[in-house]
Image: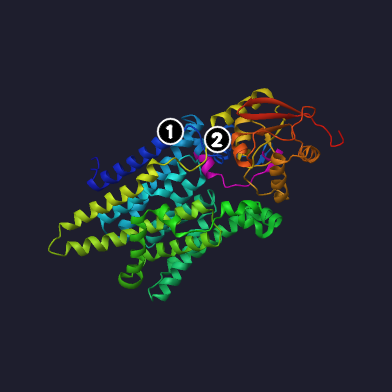
Amino acid sequence: MRAKITREQLIVALLFLAVLAIRLYLSFSNTGFDYDAYYTLRQAEHIKETGLPLFKDSLSYSGRTFITPPFFYYLLAGFSLFMPLELAAKIMPSLVWAGLVVIIYLIVKLITKNRNAAFISSLFSGLVPILFTTINQASVYSLSLFLIFLLSYAFLRIEEKGFTTMCLALTIILLLTHASVFILLLSFFVYFIILALEKQGISKREIETALFLFFLSLWFYVLLYKKAFFLHGIRFIWQNIPAPLLSSYFQDISFFEVIYAVGIIPLLLGVYAIYIILFKARGRAAMLYISFSLMSFIMLWLKLLPFQIGLLLLSLNLIILSGVAIKTSLVAISKTKVSRLSSIIAAALIILFLITIIPSLLAEPTASIPPERDMGALEWIRNNTSPNSIILGNIDEGFLINYLAGRKNVADSNFLFVNEINQRYSDINRMFDLRLESEALRLLNKYDVDYIFLSTKSMDEYDIDQLFYAEKNCFDLVYDKEAKVYEFLFCDVEQ
């Protein structure tokens, strides 16, 4: 006998499909990806062709080693068996981001035992403004955040049959996806501290599972990244990012940015929920998401999390907590003589939320997409240069040079296992804005550069429209269609 689909399941499914449709529409409105997505595409392409991740890359930094958990790239490669890779890179992350709606619904329903609060919170999670910054990304964080919140849900139900095994399985998948699992694992211990201070019982199974998962994760990542740690020391925590770039990767958090990321309605409800949980209702399960919010905020403040990811985690946790405030308000109103007002209040919350996110829906996605005129220059490089050529480009364009032109770069935005990265970063910047030819020749010879890709992005960044030192005796302008490509004729400094 076929199982009957309930009204509740139908509403959640429709919400999932609506969020997916919005994301796909916005994603397909722009044909490209952000610059970092091209690393993901190369990994998935290599897995599809060879069955193995790209550990030894002859193109990145003109030859280097990659160490990265590969599960996300295998999943994307699997999708690409049924459709073109770039189409799969649009659809698969959108499916996962939309799937968060279902997970948030299950979590809020578990915490509040109230379907209306769960519906409203899941709607918030699908349309929260910070998610629109991920539209043009093919990021591993889409899968890792989905798995993290699913793991938190399984942990809350750990006393039930099968959920301990589910916690272990999800942790293993997360270990093979991204190191962000540590944020949740550390949150478990903050959760235990809060429960102890509130004099609420902590089950033996919770403690044992949390400790086992933490030490399993620690052991796995020590084995995976020990060489990087010995090479970079404490800089490994910040991924060996060049010092001048740290401020853009790990920004200072501000109250206005949190308002924009979460939306004013979920933010106010989330803060109110924290007050209710800590001083009135003392909901045990909700304490986990207070701990998770606190850990996300601390790691953002200490600049241990990339800014966008920290805001995503903080936003989704506040949205989960907002379900408690919504439930409290709706239940309180339902007990008055105007109980029908609870439906009006619920509708008003949704309408106010939708009004406040309209600017985010109408705004252009913030992820930077390479312009067509730059892509055309790289296509020219692919078709008209030697396969062993080394291309100097903006550091953000390194993966794009590898993927689209199929050529070696001088640097890209994966900095692990790269020695003297600060010096290399400084040299790249100087090779674009230098005026002294002799110094430019020295640096170009140092990195064995064959071609210089002067993109429109670089022109805007360095406020130039040509290379000042590119004299005809040492350089040949071989491509000039807004973006420019110079061939370096290997002059020595003495010449």
Q: Is 66 covered by the magenta stretch?
A: yes
Q: Residue at x 16, y 64 (%)?
A: 335
Q: Position of residue 76 (x, y in %)?
A: 50, 38
Q: Is residue 170 visible?
A: yes
Q: 427 and 104: which one is in front?
A: 427
Which residue is the site of mark 2?
A: 370
Q: Quadrant of the N terminus?
A: top left
Q: On residue 295, which mark appears?
A: none
Q: Which residues are magenta?
A: 60-75
Q: Residue furthest right?
A: 494
Q: Secondary structure at mark 2?
A: loop
Q: 223 and 427: which one is in front?
A: 427
Q: Position of residue 131 (x, y in %)?
A: 42, 47
Left/right placement of residue 378 relative to residue 119 reads right
Q: Position of residue 47 (x, y in %)?
A: 57, 36
Q: 159 and 487: which one is in front?
A: 487
Q: Is residue 165 visible?
A: no
Q: Residue at x 47, y 46 (%)?
A: 143
Amino acid type assigned to the residue bearing label 1 in the image:
Phe
Q: How is the image coloured?
A: rainbow
Near mark 2 (Cα within 10 A), the count class, few <14, some 14-19 or many ≥20, is some
Mark toward the start of the polypeptide (1 vs 2): 1
Which residue is the site of mark 1?
A: 28
Q: Quadrant of the C terminus?
A: top right
Left/right placement of residue 202 relative to residue 395 reads left
Q: Secondary structure at mark 1?
A: helix
Q: Residue at x 44, y 61 (%)?
A: 292
Left/right placement of residue 481 relative to residue 449 reads left
Amino acid type assigned to the residue bearing label 2 in the image:
Pro
